[in-house]
Image: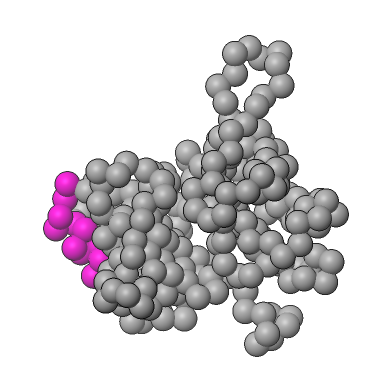
């Protein structure tokens, strides 16, 4: 990076994992004070939730800015990641929401990546 | 690890002395473009082509601020910056993250060139 410490640029990190016979792709964009995370099996952007901590509540605030409001998966994932990382988190979750065991494994995979490669978030 | 299903390209350079970053990411139903001088996503705007009544008329676009300050200049900048992306990508809607310190015509022109260098569609 040309400007060194003064200017830390956006970085992109991709990883995939076979979870319950299905290849799940992860795409992370590291931003200043937060990150954007997309999860899916096909390259579709079907929703987007944003979450960040507030000093008034122990649980981070979360809102859905795009997609079907009846799908709570992006919101709740964003909220839990915001709580864990203390950052502003954008989440797009494009996997079947009916499958709760899948979403649990997906979340664990993200947490593993957070622990192994914190520099990408 | 296997190659990601999500393609993205990024560029970084100074625009009128301000470090500026562009990240373009391709989804099958959206092009996600982040234009930032703060390292953040900032204002989120969706730029959607209107369904055309006939092929002879010039295409029109709707802009909607999904997150952030909804002011007229935001819509103007968003249309100016994202319309060509939508047209070149087969009329896909564009999700635009806009966080600019300098929204002058000159800066917008230079940033547009940066987007062109990050063509993922």
Q: How is the image coloured?
A: one colour
Q: Is A115 located above or below residue A11 in the figure?
A: below
Quarter of the rendering occupied by the C terminus of chain B: top right
Seen at 47% across and 81% down, the residue is A119
Q: Is there any visible trace of residue A110 in the rendered image?
A: no
Query: Is A30 left, or right, of B76 in this rendering?
Result: left
What stretch of residues is rendered in magenta? A98-108
- Provide residue A64's location: percent of width, then percent of height: 36, 52
Name which quarter of the figure residue A54 lies in.
Answer: bottom left
- Provide residue A93's location: percent of width, then percent of height: 33, 53
Name which quarter of the figure residue A6 lies in.
Answer: bottom right
Query: Is B94 left, or right, of A21 in this rendering?
Result: right
Query: Is A52 left, or right, of A31 in this rendering?
Result: left
- Provide residue A59's location: percent of width, then percent of height: 27, 71
Seen at 37% across and 64% down, the residue is A51
Quarter of the rendering occupied by the N terminus of chain B: bottom left
Seen at 82% across and 72% down, the residue is B17
Magenta stretch: dominant SS? helix
Q: Is A25 located above or below residue A12 in the figure?
A: above
Extreme residue in the bottom direction: A5
Query: Is A26 left, or right, of B111 in this rendering?
Result: left
Of the pair A3 and B39, the residue shown nearer to us: B39
Of the pair B43 and A42, the residue shown nearer to us: B43
Q: Is A93 located above or below residue A2 in the figure?
A: above
Q: Is residue A10 magenta?
A: no
- Provide residue A66's location: percent of width, then percent of height: 41, 46
Q: Is residue A106 magenta?
A: yes
Seen at 50% across and 65% down, the residue is A29
Extreme residue in the front direction: A56
Q: Is there any visible trace of residue A53 in the rendered image?
A: yes
């Amino acid at each position: 990076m040309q400007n060194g410490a003064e200017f830390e640029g956006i970085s992109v990190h991709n990883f995939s994992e076979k979870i319950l016979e299905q290849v799940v792709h992860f795409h992370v964009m590291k931003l200043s004070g937060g990150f954007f995370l997309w999860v899916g099996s096909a390259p579709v952007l079907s929703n987007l939730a944003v979450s960040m901590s507030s000093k008034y509540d122990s649980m981070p605030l979360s809102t859905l800015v795009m997609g079907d409001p009846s799908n709570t998966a992006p919101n709740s994932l964003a909220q839990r990641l915001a709580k864990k990382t203390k950052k502003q988190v954008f989440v797009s979750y494009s996997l079947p929401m009916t499958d709760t065991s899948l979403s649990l494994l997906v979340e664990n995979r993200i947490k593993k990546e957070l622990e192994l490669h914190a520099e990408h978030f | 690890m296997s190659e990601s299903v999500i393609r993205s390209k990024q560029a970084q350079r100074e625009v009128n002395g301000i470090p500026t970053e562009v990240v373009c990411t391709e989804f099958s139903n959206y092009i996600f473009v982040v234009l930032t001088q703060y390292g953040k996503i900032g204002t989120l705007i969706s730029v959607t082509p209107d369904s055309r009544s006939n092929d002879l008329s010039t295409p029109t676009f709707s802009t909607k601020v999904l997150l952030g300050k909804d002011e007229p200049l935001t819509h103007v900048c968003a249309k100016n910056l994202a319309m060509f992306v939508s047209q070149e990508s087969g009329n896909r809607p564009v999700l635009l993250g806009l966080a600019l310190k300098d929204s002058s015509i000159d800066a917008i022109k230079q940033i547009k060139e940066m987007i062109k260098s990050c063509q993922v569609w």
